Image (cartoon, grey):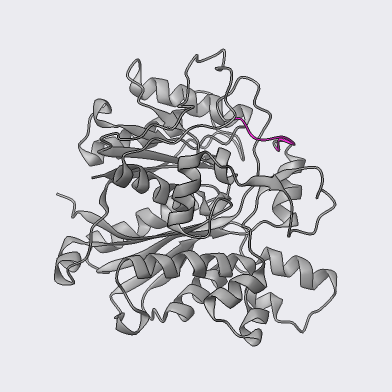
Amino acid sequence: MQKEILITGLGVISAIGNSVAENLASLKSGKSGIDKIQFLQTIHKDTFKVGEVKLSNLQMCDLLGLSANDYKKQTRTSLLAIMAAKEALQSAGLAPDGLNRRIGVVSATTVGGMDKTELEYADRNFDSGFIQTHPSGDSTDSIAEYLKIGGYRTTISTACSSAANAIIHAAKLIQHGYLDMALVGGTDALSKFTLNGFNSLMILDKDFCKPFDQNRQGLNLGEGAGFLIIESVESAKKRHAKVFCKLAGFANTNDAYHQTASSPEGEGAYRAMQEALKMSGLNIGDIDYINVHGTGTNNNDLSEGVALKHIFGDHLPPFSSTKSFTGHTLGAAAGIEAVFSILAILHGIVYPNLNFTTAMEELGIYPQTELITDCNIQHVLSNSFGFGGNNSTLVFSK
């Protein structure tokens, strides 16, 4: 029997808020954070809409109490990570000075320190130290240094499923007795590299993204960070921790179909959901809400929709894509959406899938388009599917 994994801390920053409370308020009010580009310096500034965090790097440094010298060493990716990680630690009732070496940090990112590299390299400012901040692991190191966590740390980068795999990796470390608890999640900042890259793939929508809509044109990129504190039952009991819910099941699969596209049959997505449900011991009728990957691209939504129908048949529970609020935050997406999934359980709500008007002809399925409140949400399934067919599903239970 697998050891239970409990969630005892939550932290998030995204285009719709700088804290858990702010994000929840925006989700409940139907307020999207997708808008014109404000901070990213790009020739596409007036072409594409993005889900940008409404704080400059300097403002985040001020909020975190970082000095001017610290500011020079931090990437936007790292600052977003520290903001959310600090909140998660505080909500778990943990203080940096009281942490021991049985807590680990498992963080995820796709873009790493690219935002700083772009700025410094363009100016040929090779003495700025940007080379040291470029690797994906720099943001993980920054979290650990800021929060004084001296134990195990590692960084996961598996495209858009990165943060889900960070959660899975840390959960396994706890189950096998290597850690008592872990700070887990993901972070990514907007950069010209990602904007230009997704533009070259021709999967960006110049208007607001429309997940699962027949007329969807692509995704809106976003940025942010989402982190959890997960721990063993023994650890939570020992410190009398407040428990938000549990990680009931998880799975990672790969359909190995294409470098970027998901298989039309949704085979990898289907197996990820199937195996996560099997681990959780739940039946399809037990799932009360699905936070779908739902990018708004032609390929993803059709592939995921096929997999959903394969798993749930005529018993598909309410589902929605919160990327219509935040944009697609890449390596941070599964961390942010894990927080949103847990909030759905805690507050008994199902979020609307914004901008939806017409069901896909191939599937005829309808996401939830209105906020549902006062629900008895016991179990939420959250999907995160990455390039290369790397598919991950998490199941959270009350």
Query: Which image quadrant: the C terminus?
Result: top left
Give whichever of 165, 382 is nearer the camera: 382
Q: Is residue 246 above or below residue 109?
A: above
Instruction: Count all numbered tags in the image, as a single digit.
Output: 0
Residue 57: percent from left, percent from top? 65, 70
Q: Nearer the viewer, residue 184 or 84?
A: 84
Which residue: 44% across, 49% down?
24
Residue at horizontal 64 percent and vertical 26 percent from the top? 216
Q: In the picture shown, does residue 335 fall above or below 391? A: below
- In the rendered image, residue 208 lying in the magenta stretch gets the answer yes
* 218 horizontally vs 143: left or right: right
Q: Quadrant of residue 70?
A: bottom right
Q: Is residue 175 visible?
A: yes
Residue 390 appears in the figure: no
Magenta span main SS: loop
Q: Is residue 348 above or below residue 141?
A: above
The magenta region covers: 204-210
Look at the picture and state if 222 lies above or below 76.
above
**To which quarter of the image does residue 154 belong?**
bottom left
Viewer-nearest residue: 391 or 363 = 363
Say whether residue 44 is left or right of residue 137: right
Describe residue 182's horizontal placement relative to residue 221 as left or right. left
Q: Is residue 218 magenta?
A: no
Tell me residue 288's x, y (percent): 30, 32
Give coordinates of residue 81: x percent, y percent. Answer: 52, 66
